[in-house]
Amino acid sequence: MPDLSVIIPARNEEFLAITIDNVMDNARADTEVIAVADGCWPEPVVRDRPGVRLIHHTESIGQRAATNEAAKLSRAKYVMKLDAHCAVDEGFDVKLMEHCEPDWTVVPRMYALDAFHWVCRTCGKEYDQGPPRKTCDKCGPAEFERKLVWKKKNRKRTDYMWFDDTLRIRYFDKPNLAMFGDVADLKERCSHKKRDWARDDITDVMCCIGACWFQTRDRYWELGGLDEGHGSWGQVAVELACKAWLSGGRHVINKKTWFAHLSRTQKGFSWPYPMSHKAQEYARAYSRDMWLNDKWSKAVRPLSWLVDKFGPLPGWEKEHLAGVVYYTDGQCDDEILKASRASLSRSTEMPIVSVSTEPLDFGFNVVVREPKRSTRRMYQQILAGLEQLKTDVVFLAEHDVLYTPDHFEFQPPRQDTFYFNTNRWNVYADTGEARFYDSRTNSAMCCNRKLLLDWVRKRISRIDEEGAFRGRWGHSPGSPGDPEKPKFDTWQSEVPLVDIRHGRCTSGVRRHPSDFRTGAREMQVADGVPGWGQSKGRFREWLGKACGSVDFVGGGTTSTPG
């Protein structure tokens, strides 16, 4: 009977064989690997060596089910789950077993993995991992070969993580925490590194990322294994943390050993499992219902105990730090209005201030009765919403745009900059045809609320001084003709926003590259929007599903235009 079974669920993982060899080469105890080739054959192939078992499924059973299956085959005292794109420390197994009590879940210290470099075949210059290169800084167009590195990046280390009140994983040492208030104050109040007991080699952690964790096999099954009710993928880190702590046990980090992980969020890497947003949102909803409502039957502690233990934590405080201003003049088809509000409601739990020309039962409603439809009235509506909203960060939302949850996950890094989500497709109500072109619009903006408040007040004053809105200024902060010349930047959500173009659009319905005042733009034309399904020739049916469904219409793997 081995000491440890390292469980590796894998689907379309090009680094599976390297990961297995790395684990076996660095093991110093009686350690085996049980890998599950979930719906695929490993390529490159996994070489035959003692202590390695490979399970193959013709049809994918999912990451959770694959992990549970491998754990059932184990007869070891300990089990460790590991992603199929990781490196481990020499003697990791011995070091983890030396510091693991029966009711603990343990994670090693985590580093970023430097997996490979691109090497110019002409001059030998090396470039960091990423998409295949075609150009060398020295040689110009050139051919490259991939050089395996497979080492940890010593300067990219993560020890402590937490999750907010939406059960999303956060990092204490990342700079994108402006959404939660003053970053320096946040680190001072919340970071484990500021606490005396965090300086030890074995310390408590609220949660991990789920890429690598270690516990006794008996403990794994005592806690129920991985809950397949979530679906295949998603919320594993929250599940591990809540089970470890709420069962009466501990979740700890062992800094005496490490693993290095290749992040899939890096440019040039894709997710091995299909990432349907319908499935992801189901997993998140299932997780929130389980833990926020204290429904886990094995819990001896409430979730509030865990939050208090690691608090104060942003997101768990009573006051929301981000909110939405939704503005509408009602000049739109009722079905479009309904679909937009439905998408907004299901995409965020932030406070919403709606601003309309007539009373509206949506969020906290503010009525602006200026009768004439104009650009000034639009700004007046935005101003009224900003004055009512009391959060630090604001998202703007318009009545003919369909929104997605990951749009509202964005956190503005700077308080002096306007940010625009440029992953926004247009769908034309008369034909259902979809078009993408690069643009920045108010309906996809996120920024510091006071920054936007100041800009809108200045814009209204300028309109009043000029006697009318001047098109050369542009509608959005940072437009080419904006007299204020503020700072702006862009980001792209994973799933696009959908801007429905109809006969009452304030900015007009642009269908051709020549329809732009500032010059022609490149357009991408399609029968539908990635992640939302086909809309061409079936707009009403498509919109009805978008309006009435809790999840997105499209399903399957999503893509970003570009």
Image (cartoon, helix red, strand yellow):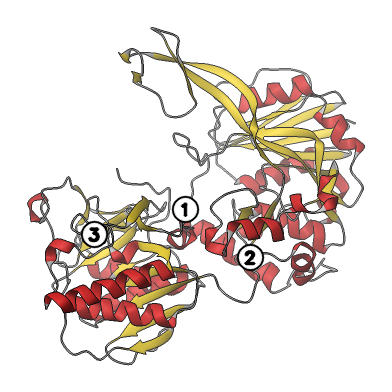
Is 138 placed above or below 408 here?
A: above
Quarter of the figure with the N terminus: top right
Q: Nearer the viewer, residue 529 or 186?
A: 186
Compared across the picture, whether 525 is left or right of 257 comes to left
At label 3, the amino acid type is Asn
Determine whether label 3 and label 2 are within 8 Å by CB. no
Residue 270 showing in the rendered view: yes
Compared across the picture, whether 251 is left or right of 147 comes to right
Please report whichever mark, 3 or 2, sits nearer to the chain's N-terminal start. Answer: 2
Please report whichever mark, 2 or 1, sits nearer to the chain's N-terminal start. Answer: 1
At label 2, the amino acid type is Pro
Residue identified by numbered label 1: 276
Q: Residues within 10 Å of mark 2 (few under 14, many from 20)?
A: many
Residue furthest toward the top?
A: 122
Q: Nearer the viewer, residue 75 or 87?
A: 87
Please report whichever mark, 3 or 1, sits nearer to the chain's N-terminal start. Answer: 1
Residue identified by numbered label 3: 426
Frontmost of labels 3 and 2 is: 2
Residue identified by numbered label 2: 314
At label 1, the amino acid type is Ser
